[in-house]
Structures are given as C-alpha cells and as structure tokens.
Image (cartoon, grey):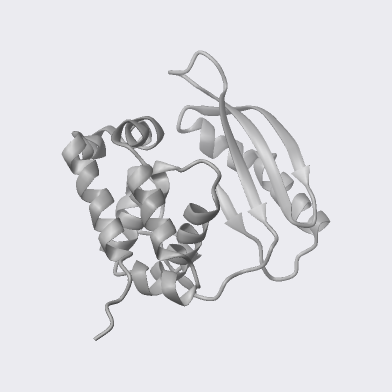
Amino acid sequence: MDLDAGGGESVHALREKVNSIVGGQPFRQTLLARGIEIEHITESKQTETVQRWKLGLLTVTADRPLPTKIEFSRRGLDAGVRFEQVDPAVTASYRLSPILTNHYDAATAARQKLEALQSRKAPQARDVFDLHLLRSAGADIGRVAREAGLSLPDLQARVMDITQPMFVGQVLAYLPPEEQARYVGPHVWDRMVLDVADALQEESVP
C-alpha cells in the first residue's frame, strides 16, 4: 500500500499512529476473521521523506509468510486530490463496509504514471497497463504529458519496448482470476500498447 502523507504531521506522530493501528487488537481481529495473521512487522524506513513498514502475513493457504508493506511518501501532495467513496465493487470483494477516502483524479494519476514511465531505469508493464486504464477513465494522457513537459517520443519508445511476456509476469499473474481472462493473449496486450502509444502522438500543426 503506497500513500502520500499530507497535513504536516511529524514523522514521530505518523509512526505512532500507524503502530497503534497495526499493533492494535481491532485491526488484528479484523484480519483473523478473514484468515490472516500478522507474523511480523518491521519499521524498515522512517525518514523525513519516506516512512515504510514491512509485514509478513500468515494465511491458511500459504506455507510461508507473505511479504507486504505500508509506505508513506512525505514529499507533499499533488493538486487534483478528491475525497470520494471507493468503488463499491472493490470494497464488496473484500467484504468491507463503504469507505470514503482521498485519492488523485485521473489526470493527476496519469501525470505521476507518465513521470514514472519516463524516469525508470527498467521499463515496467504496469505503467502501460495503468495508463490504459486511466485513458478509459477519461484522462487525456497526451495533453497531460505535454503540459508536464515530458518527451512524447521518449514515452512512446518506452511503451513500445514493453513486451507481452513482461506483462504476463509483472501484471497478469497478480490480477484476480476473474479479471485475468480479459487480458489473455498477445493481441490484447498489443492493443493496449498501441492505445497508449497513439495517445502520446505529437499534436499536428495545421
């Protein structure tokens, strides 16, 4: 879980707050009701820019602790924050009550994803997959990239370099089984790549 911390809360205050939640009985009882137990927690990084907790989770189906993390970026919040209800289909799939929370709008999330795509040393298929989903949510990623001063040819080249086997290993394997069937086959990935690459075309000059 990756979060942006805002509001000027100190490192110590946020650390104490998170520790009280993940170490508290209500949280642990909620996990136990779903067949999950916390095996260990480590405060792996606590700085003025990043705060990170690593957890090992035990489940009835896993033969070893499953690694996960909670990470807060303390570099400030971007514009474009909305306070809305989480998609009911998402909360229902986890048997959770309705949740209201802050999140970035599609354009802001697209800019963050485009910046990550351009800056990464190694390409990640999840960047293209996420940009495809953000386009479906209404983000004009070409306009966003131009307004952010990013190199459209460089972004296009990076998108085209990501192969279907990379998508299978980095993204498809982690999707819920009911979602995986929608993305099976190289032609599905090719269409997503072309969709994102075409959206990153330079504007024509009349």
Number of residue marks? 0
Please indicate whether residue 206 sits to the left or right of residue 79 in the image.
left
Q: Does any portion of residue 98 appear in the rendered image?
A: no
- Percent of width and height locating residue 3: 59, 55
Q: Quadrant of the C terminus?
A: bottom left
Residue found at x 41% / y 34%: 170
- Percent of width and height locating residue 130: 37, 53
Name the quadrant containing residue 88. Answer: bottom left
The correct choice, above or below, for 41 with respect to 87 in the image is: above
Task: Say which of 186 and 174 sits in front.
Answer: 186
Q: Does any portion of residue 199 appear in the rendered image?
A: yes
Residue found at x 55% / y 53%: 119
Q: Residue furthest right?
A: 12
Q: Residue furthest top?
A: 63
The correct choice, above or below, for 203 with respect to 206 in the image is: above
- Percent of width and height locating residue 186: 20, 35
Task: Say which of 2 and 134 sits in front.
Answer: 134
Residue found at x 45% / y 32%: 34
The correct choice, above or below, for 175 with respect to 99 in the image is: above
Q: Residue furthest front?
A: 206
